[in-house]
Amino acid sequence: MGMEDGYPRADLRTSGDSRRSTSDPDLSVDRLRMAQRRFHIMAKPGGSRCNLDCQYCYYLSKGALHDGPGIGRMSDEVLERFIQQYIEGVTGDEVVFSWQGGEPTLLGLDFFNKVVELEGKYARPGQIVHNDLQTNGMLLDEEWCEFLKENQWLVGLSIDGPRELHDAYRVDKKGESTFDQVMSAAMMLKGHNIPFNTLTCVNRLNAKHPLEVYRFLRQELDSTYIQFIPIVEYREFESKALNTLDPERLPKDGTPEARPGLPNSVVTEWSVDPYDYGSFLSRVFDEWYKYDVGKVLVNHFETLVAQHLNLPAQLCIYNEFCGRGLVVEHEGSVYSCDHFVYPEYLLGSVMDRSINEMVRSEAQIRFGQDKGDMLPGQCRMCAYLKDCWGECPKNRIIRTRDGEPGLNYLCRGLKRYFAHATPKAEKIAAGLRQKSFDPRQRMPGR
């Protein structure tokens, strides 16, 4: 699993008020096309190859996907073309490379030493290049830590909570525990003073233990930047793109099929229950609000406060539009998003088309606009529209109660969370405004 937007995140934001209406006349295709010059590409240099066999992983199946990227590793030619085009395409003073998978450390240190060499070759004078690496931690050793420390790479470490919760789904190829190895990796990173965040996949099991998960991350790992990603996977996700599903066969909001646990549920058995997800975020928010505001940054809470400061959403899932977070696979193919690696969302290849051209293409602009344009009426009338914007399009796999497609599977849980957390988030935002908070700076604790 990958970091949501990288750490530090690439500045994918357009100027203006993120809480604007979907009817804003300034949001023309031309304006969106210009905004696309600020974008982020997640790199999967080893494709879906991984040394774990996590049951919930959405990416392991990509190697076997019909007309998909296949299995392999990024060649030196593709790597150089990607790095050159990405650096040339990003117009800002900073460019962030995010290396994910699968498991990127399987490519070895020689590959990533080549990455650093090529970044130095193509970076413009004065341009700052950042790198982050999302890893399961299994292969980290002293040599890896020396590389990460020397080159000032930031690390995302995947861990799902204490042993019994982590090992429920995150097992190796033999089906055995990975908890001790991940904890060893965390201690090694801390020992080398390498900054890392924790990424926790909220699934059907650990969602029922919110405080146990959060307190473990805080007390056992001393994590000060915590990312939670909900596991939501519709059945047949391994082979079928979302836009190929028959809307008439999707369950309606409030029906048993719109939750996990039934043979005909819309999602896999390991997908988080929407009610549990809302409870998870709400209870963790209370713990964070009571003890950790200004000390710990939790991705969902940081963006909620930012949005109530009239700043752009810090997570793509809560933006009105998307389309500025693409993915490049090992053989150079570029897709609209790493959750949409299907032939239907293929934009081209870095070997025969420039990244800039693909980012600014009509197909990618339409992909980004559809996030706001395809919202059902229920969402448009929701009190939390400007906090949520329908969340991630990949999760829009149920229908409203009156049968309109495009409702987010997590809707009921998200409503519960926003109803619970928004008043306190507004209090935090009000306090920051009184302190003359500079929106150009990250919130306290970043």
Image (cartoon, rainbow, N blue to C red):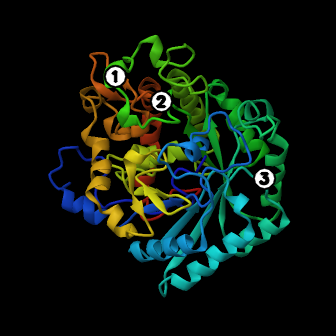
Q: Which residue is mark 1?
A: 399
Residue displayed at 37% across by 59% down: 13
Residue displayed at 37% across by 39% down: 387
Farthest front residue in view: 66
Q: Which residue is mark 3?
A: 186
Per the rendering, the mark at residue 417 is: 2
Distance in Å between CA atoms under marks 2 and 3? 30 Å
Taking the image as shown, residue 399 lies to the left or right of residue 125, namely left
Location of the C terminus by quadrant is bottom right
Which amino acid type corresponds to the residue marked 3 in the rendered image? Answer: Ala
Asked whether residue 308 is in view, the answer is no
Residue 398, horizontal then vertical, whole percent: 38, 24
Among numbered discs 1 and 2, the one appearing first in the sequence:
1
Rendered position, 85 above or below 365:
below
Which amino acid type corresponds to the residue marked 1 in the rendered image? Answer: Arg
Residue 363, horizontal then vertical, whole percent: 29, 53
> Does the CB distance between marks 1 and 3 fall below 8 Å?
no
Among numbered discs 2 and 3, the one appearing first in the sequence:
3
Taking the image as shown, residue 67 lies to the left or right of residue 28, namely right
Label 1: how many Cα within 10 Å (few below 14, some 14–19, many 20+): many
Rendered position, 432 above or below 426:
below
Farthest bottom residue in view: 125
Q: Which of the pair 348/232 is nearer the observer? A: 348
Taking the image as shown, residue 120 lies to the left or right of residue 150, namely left
Rendered position, 289 above or below 139:
above
Asked whether residue 413 is in view, the answer is yes
Which element is circle 1 on?
Answer: strand
Residue 286, horizontal then vertical, whole percent: 58, 33
Location of residue 340 by image quarter: top left
